[in-house]
Amino acid sequence: MSYRVDSSLSATDGSNSLVERCRSLEAALAQAQDFADALQRGVTASVFLLNVDADGVLRYVGFNQAHERLTGLSSEGVRGRRPTDLVPDVLTLGHALALERRYRNCVDMRTTVEYEEYLEIAGRPTWWVTSLSPLIDAEGRVARVVGSSWDITERKVAEDELRLAA
């Protein structure tokens, strides 16, 4: 999405300050969009964002491209949904409830929480190291939770193979 300012705007007193301010804001917005796009495309960690509704319900906003690639899920397919809304197609009920507990814990503690987790995503076993951070709004309420995860499935499989071989 991009925004354009109509450059034909002009103040009646001959001042271009309004036009210059609009151009400055447009440039700042374009820079912010470029930054967000770079994060969306360039970060190799799985990144996801949840909204915390006024009633405390956590709903997915979206994922970065790495998350979509690693999980096979799309932002469009989960936007506005709770983890339990993904049962049974994507998650088991137990895994969905565990995710909601973790997210809720981050909101309640109002601090970053990190953990290792096992999830079956669309029937595929995976292991993750996950970090959840609360985003606090101007009113002091946790309005969002940003998560970043690293798929450690290959490492866990290798550890299991070493343990069995010993």
Image (cartoon, rainbow, N blue to C red):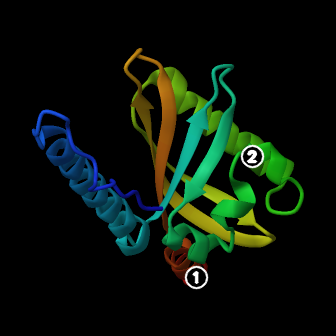
**Amino acid type of disc 1?**
Glu
Q: Residue at x 83, y 55 (%)?
A: 92
Toward which corner of the image does residue 90 lie, by quadrant? bottom right
Disc 2/disc 1 C-alpha distance (Å): 37 Å
Where residue 28 sits: x, y (%)? Answer: 23, 52
Q: Residue at x 51, y 75 (%)?
A: 159
- Marks counted in the figure total 2
Q: Which residue is mark 2?
A: 81
* Between 88 and 6, the one nearer to me in the picture: 6
Q: In the rendered view, would you say 8 is above or below 45? A: above
Dot 2: element: loop
* Between 2 and 116, the one nearer to me in the picture: 2
Q: Tell me if mark 2 has few (under 14), some (14-19) or many (20+) residues whose alpha carbon lies within 10 angstroms of its own.
A: some
Q: In the rendered view, would you say 166 is above or below 123? A: below
Q: Is residue 155 left or right of residue 24?
A: right
Q: Residue at x 55, y 67 (%)?
A: 67
Q: Which residue is mark 1?
A: 161
Where residue 10 sits: x, y (%)? Answer: 22, 44
**Amino acid type of disc 2?**
Arg
Q: Is residue 156 visible?
A: no
